[in-house]
Amino acid sequence: MRTGRLDLRHLTIDDVGKLVELNADDGVMQYLAWEPPTREQIVHEVSDLITAAEANPGHGRFIAEGADGRFVGWFSLTVGAAGPAAPELGYRLRREAWGRGLATEGSRALIDHAFINLGAESVTAQTMFVNTASRRVMEKSGMRHAKTFHVHVDDPLPGTEHGEVWYEITRDEWLTASMRR
């Protein structure tokens, strides 16, 4: 997939080093409640993601590269809890890519892909309530806040007390927004 400034391609085992580097940035991992995975764990995760993408064509983790071929981060469109008709959007970008609209651009491309090519009925995403940058990406991508919920964790991150937020865009909402673009 291509956008104005990004090339999105399926993840391969050759991307492990890029993911290790991305996950080593404390700022990137700020709102994630786990230690950065080891290289070995990432190799295992990448293998699992490739297998899942093969089982669900059109879904998966997509590596984002800029026009210059440099690694920007990743986006994902995975089968959600409600099944393939309601995939879940995710993204993680290098700090150097923040604040340039790239997260919104990649997210919109995957949302469009979900509705046009996968026949999705809705696309969802979630983040911590306090992760205002990620929430803004979801909103600028056409998603709306659907609910706030709380999860119990033994070693909570700062801001956990405010909960998690769930965003969604339905096919009808997407069609209406697409007509305005």
Image: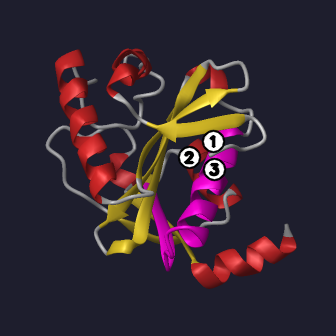
Horizontal side, residue 21 vs residue 117: left or right: left
Determine the residue positioned at 40% across, 44% down: 159
Numbered mark located on residue 134 in the image: 2
Residue 147 appears in which quarter of the rendering? bottom left
Please give the residue where the numbered disc 1 appears in the rendered image.
103
Write the start and end of the magenta stretch as one range.
102-126
Per the model, the C-alpha gap separating discs 3 and 1 is 6 Å
Q: Are marks 3 and 1 in contact (CB under 8 Å)?
A: yes
Q: Are marks 2 and 1 in contact (CB under 8 Å)?
A: yes
Q: Is 89 situated above or below 153?
A: below
Please give the residue where the numbered disc 3 appears in the rendered image.
137
Determine the residue positioned at 73% across, 25% down: 67
Q: Are marks 3 and 2 in contact (CB under 8 Å)?
A: yes
What amino acid is at disc 2?
Ser
Q: How many marks?
A: 3
Residue 39's spot in the image, x, y percent?
24, 17
Mark 2 surroundings within 10 Å by alpha-carbon count, few (fewer than 14), some (14 through 19), many (20 or more) = many
Identify the residue at the far right of this view: 180
Q: First in sequence: mark 3 or mark 1?
A: 1
Determine the residue positioned at 28% across, 33% down: 46
Mark 1 surroundings within 10 Å by alpha-carbon count, few (fewer than 14), some (14 through 19), many (20 or more) = many
Mark 3 surroundings within 10 Å by alpha-carbon count, few (fewer than 14), some (14 through 19), many (20 or more) = many
Residue 64 appears in which quarter of the rendering? top right
Q: First in sequence: mark 2 or mark 1?
A: 1
What amino acid is at disc 3?
Val
Q: Is 44 situated above or below 181?
A: above
As helix, strand or loop, the secondary structure at mark 2 comes to helix
